[in-house]
Amino acid sequence: MPDPVNLAKAQLQELDVAMKPKADGKKVTVQFNPETLKVSYTNPVGSANGRRDESDKSAAQTPASGTAKLAVQLWFDVTAPMPVGVSATDDVRKLTQDVVFFVLPRERQPNDQPTSSPGVRFRWGSFQFDGIVDSLEESLEFFSSDGYPLRASMSIGISQTQTQQVAILPGGGLPGAGLPGGALPAGTSPLAIAAAGASLQQMASAAGVGPDWQSIAAANGIENPRLLSPGQVIDFRAR
């Protein structure tokens, strides 16, 4: 009988003002890994034709900085097994309040803005995104006979300046054992993020799996491998 798979779980981690992990900061391990991650990029438009005016010296010396945004949906259910270290409860809001923490104004420090929220790092396997939670929507989906909410979904938006760039971490050393056929479960495979104008063939070749680009496209549900959407997340081990 094969050993059980140790599935890597996504995690939210509090960052300090310098956007570095806070030593005593809050960490929240998700109960269920998200099905998809959506990363979108926005560039500033400085003129009618979409180009900056480089004739001004101050503009030429200032690098263009757009924004990147991560959209993710998380689910919580008190009738399902709890994450490690989390006690059972009869109200799902006792689980979701740890995520709401990241959108509330934090205690002001000398160098902080009066209403600044904590920085947050979303990390899942080899995917890492640092930013500020700018939107959060919670839906209570299911209630007990006593009127307690048992299940909730949370739609979270995290924004960062594009100059930070989305980190793609090495895939080696991630928790989780291989499945039959060499496949790995979600959350344990290295992910790659497509840049504007990238093709799957080019990215697969750079990753050393060029001959398998067609099977990778099929496994990731990619309709147009010749032109990927900016920010599209690709699992190169899925085939």
Image (cartoon, rainbow, N blue to C red):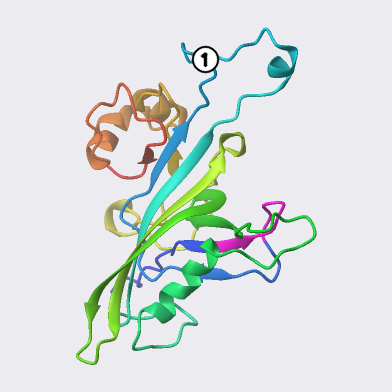
Q: Nearer the viewer, residue 55 or 230?
A: 55
In the displayed orientation, state which residue is furthest to the bottom. Answer: 146
Tell me the quarter of the image containing the C terminus.
Answer: top left
Q: Is residue 143 magenta?
A: no
Disc 1 crowd, CA 10 A, few/some/many (<14, 14-19, 20+): few
The location of residue 151, given as percent across then percent down, is 28, 75
Q: Quadrant of residue 94?
A: bottom left
Q: Nearer the viewer, residue 169 or 184?
A: 169
Residue 169 vertical position relative to residue 60 in the rendered view, above or below: below
- Count how many numbered circles sit on residues in the image: 1
Q: Give, as a single range, the part of the protein colored magenta.
A: 13-21
The location of residue 177, given as percent across then percent down, is 40, 63
Secondary element at tag 1: loop
Q: Is residue 17 magenta?
A: yes
Q: Main secondary structure of the magenta part?
A: loop
Tell me the quarter of the image containing the N terminus.
Answer: bottom left
Q: Is residue 168 left or right of residue 35?
A: right
Which residue is located at x 28 percent, y 26 percent? 225
The location of residue 176, given as percent across then percent down, is 43, 63
Q: Which residue does the numbered mark 1 point to in the structure image?
A: 47
